[in-house]
Image (cartoon, grey):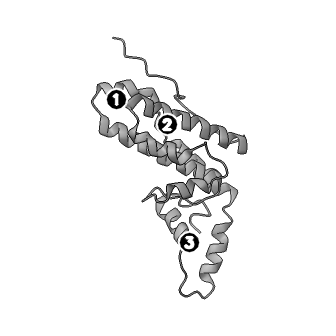
Amino acid sequence: RRLVELEELEEPWQKGALGLLEGLVLHDDGTIARWRERLRDFPEPLRRALIELHWRDLFPLWHYEEQIAARDAELWRLEMLIDGALRLLGVLAALNRVYYSRFQVKRLRELTASFALAPKHLAERLDSLPQLPSPAAAEELGQLVLETRELVLQELPDLELPLRFPPGTRQEPMRL
């Protein structure tokens, strides 16, 4: 109820929804069947709310790439790269009405294959991100962001998906 009625959108509730939908029921007095039916519906307000939730905190790694490299912040760069990939998965899962939790993401190819709407070769491109050299990884993440945004806006043209720093932009050096 908390998830479907948009009270709690964060991780534990989506992981719980996945468990209810995919788990093996050993005994049911009808309660689990009712919960499953309600979750299968994946209402439109939930879809939109989850897209916005995952989109809102996408960090524009491409914009700050040079400054990150200059500050010897490789671990943080990788964290933001992975975070961006997981957030894009969340956007695409919601777009496709698939429950998703970034906690212990497993079976990436199976998950992305279930998406009718997704950038081409999504699983392979996401898997390759940590192996790509620094600027190329940020550029590929930016490209995935643009492709994902286009897919969402084709499906939901009234949804606002702001990009404060669109892919391809770079932070200007500070001038004193």
Q: In this view, does 123 lie to the left or right of 116?
A: left
Which residue is painted at 54% across and 79% down in the image?
24
Residue type (three-letter) at the residue carrying disc 2: Leu
Q: Report x, y in % for residue 121.
A: 57, 44
Residue at label 3?
A: 22
Mark toward the viewer: 2 or 1: 2
> How far across and down, in percent of the image, does residue 109 sit?
53, 54
**Helix, strand or loop at disc 1?**
helix
Q: Mark 2 points at which residue?
A: 141
- Residue type at mark 3 is Glu
Q: Residues within 10 Å of mark 2 (few under 14, many from 20)?
A: many
Amino acid type for the residue under numbered disc 1: Ile
Is residue 60 depicted above or below 115 in this figure? Answer: above
Q: How many labels does the image show?
A: 3
Q: Where is 12 relative to 174, above or below?
A: below
| Mark 1–mark 3 distance (CA, rounded to whole Å) | 41 Å
Circle 3: element type: helix
Foreground disc of the pair 1, 3? 3
- Can residue 61 be seen in this snapshot? no
Q: In this rendering, is residue 11 above or below 77? A: below
* Residue 2 in which image quadrant: bottom right
Labelled pair 1, 3 in contact (Cβ < 8 Å): no
Q: To which residue does mark 1 refer?
A: 68
